[in-house]
Image: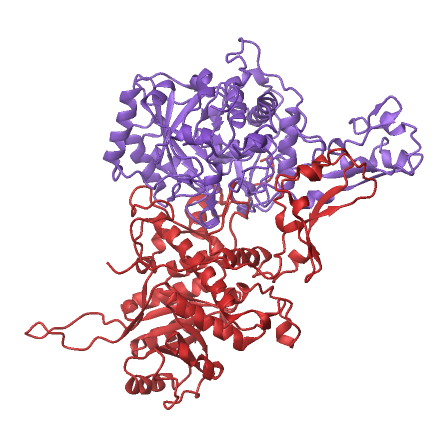
Chain colours: A red, B purple
Amino acid sequence: MPAKYHIHVRRVAPRFSPLGRSTIIDWSEGCLRCARCVKEMCPVEAYRKRDFDRTQLTDTIDEMCRDCFRCVQGCPRELIFKALNPQYRQLGDDYWTPEIITLTWYQAESGKIPVSGAGYGGPFAGPGFDALWTDMSEIVRPTRDGIHGREYISTSVDLGRKPMFLAFDGQGELLFTPPPLLEVPLPLLLAEPPLGAALPRLRQMLGQAAQSLGTLALAPREHLTEELLPLARHLAPHYAPGKMNLQDPILPQVRAAELADHAGVLEDMEALKKRYPQLIVFIKVPADGRAEARVADLTRAGAEVVHLYGTHKARGLGDCRDLHLKDLIRRCHLRLVADACRDAVTLLASGGIALAEHVAKAIICGADAVVADIPLLLSLECRLCKECREDGPCPIELENLPVKRGAQRMVNLMGAWNNQLLEVLGAMGMREVRRLRGEVGRAMFKEDLDQEIFAPLFAPREGEPLRREGE
Amino acid sequence: MAVAKKKVIPLKPKPGQPYEPVPTPSRFRTPLSKYRVWRSDSKCIKCGKCVELCPYGVFTKAGTYLRRPKSHLCLGFACRDKEFYCVNKCPGQALRVSIHPVYATLGDARWTADLLLATWWQAEWGSLPYTDLEYRLGGSGGGFDRLRFSFPPPRRDFKLRPEDISLELDLNRRGDGRPQVRLGVPFYAAGMSFGSVSINTILSRVQAAARFHTLLCTGEGGYPEELYPYDDHVITQVATGLFGVREETIQRVRMVEFKYAQGAKPGLGGHLLGDKVTPAVARMRESVTGSALFSPFPFHSVYSVEDHKKHIDWIKEINPRALVSVKVSTPTDVDMVAVGSYYAGAHVVQLDGSYGGTGAAPDIAKKNIAMPVEYAIPKVHQFLKAEGIREQVTLIASGGIRTAFDVAKAIALGADGVQIGTAELVALECLRCHNCESGRGCARGIATTDPELVDLMTVAWGVNRVSNLYYSWSWQLKEILRRFGMRSIRELRGRTDTLVHLDYQDRPVDDDLRRGA
């Protein structure tokens, strides 16, 4: 058995106090000066420990408050309130919600799985990844004690072309050399986020995080400068159409490279493979209406790894703008299955992978591994204010974040994600993530459950009018 | 044991003396509220007019001293048209009614601020709020929250009185010669271990269960001595960690619950964080103070239905009068699991849906693993019917049952009864801050074993709060049955025709019991 893969998470304190959903409003006007003030009775001593943060010019009490409302309910003059924090609501956008952002901060800080008491408080279901539930197994599973597994659950995946069968000669020797495979110990690749301040520093962090995790970081070739070369084994340069150059000095040092899809991509790939036989070549394909056919064509033509990408809100591109990435992954996966060549190729997916559960769900829908981008930026305490797009000042001063700390926060986040993937796999009774790929039978899609269970009970039958109130 | 002996409330009320609600106000000085009534001290001329005007008792005085307005009793904006609207009539224009700023910070999609406030109201008074609080639904946008009862027009010839309507539920339907357990209401209290919640919480729940002739499950945390007087109302749980499970505890009770999985963390073991393992908890669980306790997953001795049967037989052998309940989560093949449990000899199959409560669980599990109970109930109900064994097994649903309407909807979807947990904690003034697991535990003294925090709540108070909620729910269930002309909760089971699902229906349906009929 190989050594157990372990991600070394270590707490990295935030540099800015994280924003909370609500905030304490504490009027002192009319205070009775009670002999024993409710503030003294705070169970977490928030009032005693509160401080004034001189860099951010804020009160630190909201970081400590645990929302028990005892001071709100206890003050005899009703002078203490909790109110929604407007800054919190302004975080991110409609997809990258404040909840996702703060949850990412927590994981990047602690490296821990978010755990809480009381039941789930969110909506019943939602669009995209929120419209499916993963399965669990009542009896059959690897024996584990919570997250402290005794038995090994593998999260390794292989990137590359797999032969559909082996052939041997009379002596029992393989008749051909199998194509190279790159094994990464977790089904996650890192990629340079589409925005962010202090990008050269950010790329250093990405490279170091990829090295520490044992995976790859994807970045445009032109961004991979000299000082990143020591990390080349953990980098994969991305070449825009026509930009690939066989003489590129980085190519002998990297293990994988990515080509944007274009008419001549197969020739480029052939040339690369001829020159660097051990190099794994990814082809990055937009998740639009042609993706399904294109993925099938590329696979038939010998592609090793196809990277399907959607928008940063997990939607398709072009004519598939209204479709969710998960459905586009499913289409491509099923097409490859129908063409009997699914196992030949590795399918990566990216775009809007925001939470640990998205990793598991994208894999269930048919991806072999996923690519994380924006969450890595969030792990550095980014608030998605998007000021950097207009060269505005970065409110979290990314330019001052030490590379090591930033990289460790990325590692923490990926560590927390990987542990959550283990939870999902463990609950399903699966021992390895390779088995999860395309296992839609181990997931429950809301539309299927509605169709199977609710529609027969509640849908009006053919020709029957909708029921009226009181009928 | 460090915990002092608690007052024992008589177990069996004399026949003909059903529980009557006892007003039990909030433990905290100011109850939380939707509206805020504010009186400006500088403008108030202390005439006392508001005290005379308000029929809801928002304003009170002691001698000439005007007390602070009791905002939570205020009718709110609906009062504006009334002739007793204090704001208009105040000679000094000193009064203001507005939405309380705290209201927006309360609750979440499943338990909205309204639902919390309405549940607190029911726990205080035992009746539905007269204000505009929504007491039937949460805001999750799916499942129970998209289902409505479609009441028929009132029929004059059908006047059932509350005493004509039965809420009783028999748990043993196997006809195997074991004693019958008849519940007075179609719900019982879900397992919450000593350790995850305080002994006062457990005693409040069990005493309320006794008053309403129903049961309480101990959860996986041993059998505290304080429960011994209530043996007939206790279900003891056998779960994977076997914490505190002994032959003696199994022999005490009328029903034993065999827990495979919990809806909030299906496929994952239980987890009590080290901070909550106080000396008392450690002794009960035969473990070490301060060290976190994991229940393994799954039962390492169960790998087949045959193994499962072996365990059930073992329990039946140790306690020949006990019924056996099997608690499972809701995987894709939940229907097969239910059938397997029946063939292994279970009297009760309990489905714990994915949105249920927990003392501590990974967020990813709570949200994503296993299906909501709204799907699982009809799936299992129909499958058991097709197998021809539906009448031999009692199907209990849990995991996200928040209101009396959820109870009725679960039954109409095909369950025989339900288990409730979070709703009772809300009755004890839980506000779902989700911090049960951390540090000293619940800052409101419910889900904690910290001696100082536990004392925030007395059993006498807690039992009345839970009883008031049970009373209000019983009233609502009977009212729902009455409007359908049903004499027993048994008649409602599987009657999906009483429900409409808003996804398949575009006309408004109003099932508010405060209106009509």
Q: Is residue A242 visible?
A: yes
Q: Nearer the viewer, residue B301 or A26?
A: A26
Residue drawn at 47 percent across, 64 percent down:
A408
**Left or right: B261 as drawn, with respect to A403:** left
Q: Nearer the viewer, residue B328 or B412?
A: B328
Q: Nearer the viewer, residue A46 or B445?
A: A46
In the rendered image, residue A339, in percent from the top left (x then y), is placed at 29, 69
Give the vertical position of B123 relative to A191 (above or below).
above
Residue drawn at 32 percent across, 38 percent down:
B337
Give the vertical position of A211 relative to B16 (above or below).
below
Residue drawn at 33 percent across, 49 percent down:
A149
Q: Is residue A287 visible?
A: no
**Left or right: B161 as drawn, with respect to A405:** right
**Left or right: B25 as drawn, with respect to B220:** right
Quarter where residue B416 is shown: top left
In the rendered image, residue B53, in percent from the top left (x then y), is placed at 86, 27
Considering every residue shown, the one lying at the far bottom of the view is A247
In the rendered image, residue B468, in percent from the top left (x then y), is placed at 60, 23
Residue drawn at 32 percent across, 41 percent down:
B298
In the rendered image, residue B149, in percent from the top left (x then y), is placed at 56, 35
Give the vertical position of B284 relative to A41 (above or below).
above
Q: Classify the position of the C terminus of chain B by image quarter.
A: top right
